[in-house]
Image: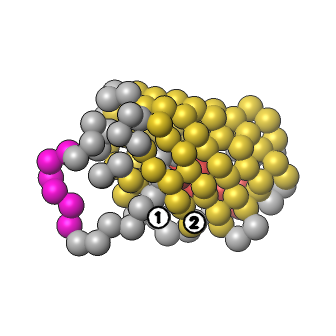
Amino acid sequence: MSSNRGIRTGILLGVFGLAYINGCWSAAARTPFDGDWSVMIVTSNGACAASYRSGVQIANGAVISAGGLVDMQGQVTPKGAVRVTVQSGSQWANGYGHLTKTRGGGQWRGQGTSGSCSGTWIAERR
């Protein structure tokens, strides 16, 4: 995986935040945002890849992801506000925005191996 793609994947996964969850979570949604989402990240400035799409799952307001390439911290609040910090080595990104029950969007900015990048993200519930 290239360095730019690694930070893009990290940003994507970090858009909603990651919290450590011990044990199994309930099958019933605990927040209006829990469930499967498709997220598209678009770079508008900088040397990162033009766009990237991936699926994520939100449980209890936090992202559940099989990837372990980055350190992510953040949260979706009960009202849908999203703030996240993502770091992988010297690469990092901050994202923020808002979700409704079916879609959302926001902005991100970060520092990759080729310099700074920024752009937008959009999400849709699957």
Colour treatment of the image: secondary structure
69 in relation to 104, above or below: below
Q: Secondary structure at mark 1?
A: loop
116 displayed left or right of 21: right
**Residue in view at x 50 percent, y 41 percent:** 82
Quadrant of image for the N terminus: bottom right
- Secondary structure predominantly adopted by residues drawn in magenta: loop
The label nearer to you, 1 versus 2, is: 2
Question: Gap in Å between the C-alphas at discs 1 and 2?
Answer: 8 Å
Q: Residue at x 71, y 44 (%)?
A: 109
Residue 124 in view (yes/no): no
- Quadrant containing the C terminus is top left
Residue 81 image offset from top left, x and y in percent:
47, 37
Q: Is residue 113 visible?
A: yes
Label 1 packing within 10 angstroms: few (<14), some (14-19), many (20+)? few
Marks 1 and 2: CB-CB under 8 Å? Answer: yes
Query: Is residue 94 rendered to the left or right of residue 26?
Result: right
User: Residue 31 in the image: x percent, y percent?
Assistant: 27, 42
Mark 2: secondary structure: loop
The residue carrying mark 2 is 70
Is 34 magenta? The answer is no
Residue interval drawn in magenta = 24-29
Across and down, in percent, residue 32 comes to: 27, 36
Tell me the residue that label 1 is attached to: 67
26 versus 107 height, above or below? below
Q: Amino acid at mark 2?
A: Val
Residue at the image point whose x is 32% and y is 67% from the top: 21
The picture places residue 64, in percent across and down from the top left corner, at 37, 57
Give the amino acid at mark 1: Gly
Relative to the observer, which residue lies in front, 41 or 5? Answer: 41
Which residue occupies the extreme right position in the image?
Answer: 115
